[in-house]
Image (spheres, grey):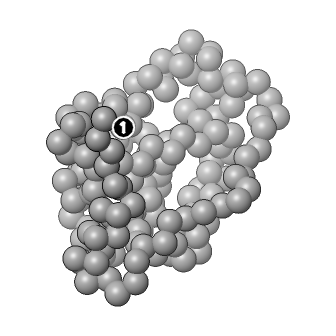
């Protein structure tokens, strides 16, 4: 079996893009986890995705945003994101944005309800931007929507 030197390839990729320092992988010695305080059938669930909702916004100025689940695009823009385009695709929106499954789970009372909004987080080279800008933006939106469970679905 061949293994893919993902970390090495990623460092080479960023060097080719002109970055002077190697990408430093995020590391957290303690994973922030909160056990559910109520049954799953009473929980509000949302999605956070890196799939681009508004493709007309240029990559360098994309920021975290919230969108109504009633306005989910038929197709997200994924072309300029880095994912394995050889062995997979994003033709099936359900594979990376499982809205219909979540709706079915809510209708069958397996989860309480779907939050009113889902959230986009841009892919960033900067940990600081993610930690200081994007994550707090999404956290605040989730608090407003009284979200109990966030499903992170990055590409």
Image quadrant of residue 5?
Answer: bottom left
Q: Identify whether 144 is placed above or below 64.
A: above
**Residue at the spot 17% in from the left edge and 42% down from the top edge:** 86
Q: Residue furthest right?
A: 37
Query: In the rendered image of this protein, does residue 40 appear above or below residue 133?
Result: above
Seen at 69% across and 31% down, the residue is: 43
Give the percent coordinates (x, y) of residue 62. 35, 69
Residue at label 1? 96
Say whether residue 87 is visible: yes
On the rendered structure, is 50 left or right of 17?
right
Q: Is residue 126 above or below residue 123?
A: below
Seen from the viewer's position, the closer of residues 79 and 105 is 79
- Helix, strand or loop status at disc 1: loop
Q: How many numbered markers are drawn? A: 1
Q: Residues within 10 Å of mark 1 (few under 14, many from 20)?
A: some
Between residue 15 and residue 93, name the one nearer to us.
15
Up the image or down, 110 lies above or below 35; here it is above
Q: Can residue 76 be seen from the camera position used here?
A: no
Relative image position of residue 137 (x, y in whole percent): 56, 65
Q: Is residue 109 left or right of residue 123?
A: right
Q: Position of residue 1 (x, y in %)?
A: 30, 35
- 119 displayed left or right of 112: left
| Left or right of 123, for residue 147 | right
Front position in the image: 24 or 76: 24
Residue 101: image quadrant is: top left
Residue 51, x across and y down, in percent: 33, 50
The residue depicted at 45 percent of the width and 63 percent of the height is 64
Picture quadrant of residue 15: bottom left
């Amino acid at each position: 079996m061949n293994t893919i030197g993902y970390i090495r390839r990623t460092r080479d990729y960023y060097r080719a893009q002109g970055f002077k320092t190697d990408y430093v992988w995020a590391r957290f010695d303690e994973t922030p986890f909160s056990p559910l305080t109520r049954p799953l059938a009473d929980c509000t669930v949302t999605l956070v995705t890196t799939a681009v909702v508004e493709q007309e916004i240029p990559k360098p100025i994309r920021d975290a945003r919230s969108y109504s689940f009633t306005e989910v695009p038929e197709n997200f823009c994924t072309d300029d994101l880095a994912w394995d385009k050889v062995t997979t695709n994003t033709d099936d929106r359900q594979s990376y944005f499982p809205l219909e499954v979540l709706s079915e789970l809510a209708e069958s009372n397996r989860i309480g309800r779907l939050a009113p909004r889902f959230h986009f987080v841009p892919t960033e080279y900067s940990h600081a931007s993610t930690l200081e800008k994007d994550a707090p933006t999404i956290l605040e939106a989730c608090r407003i929507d009284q979200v109990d469970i966030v499903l992170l679905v990055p590409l």
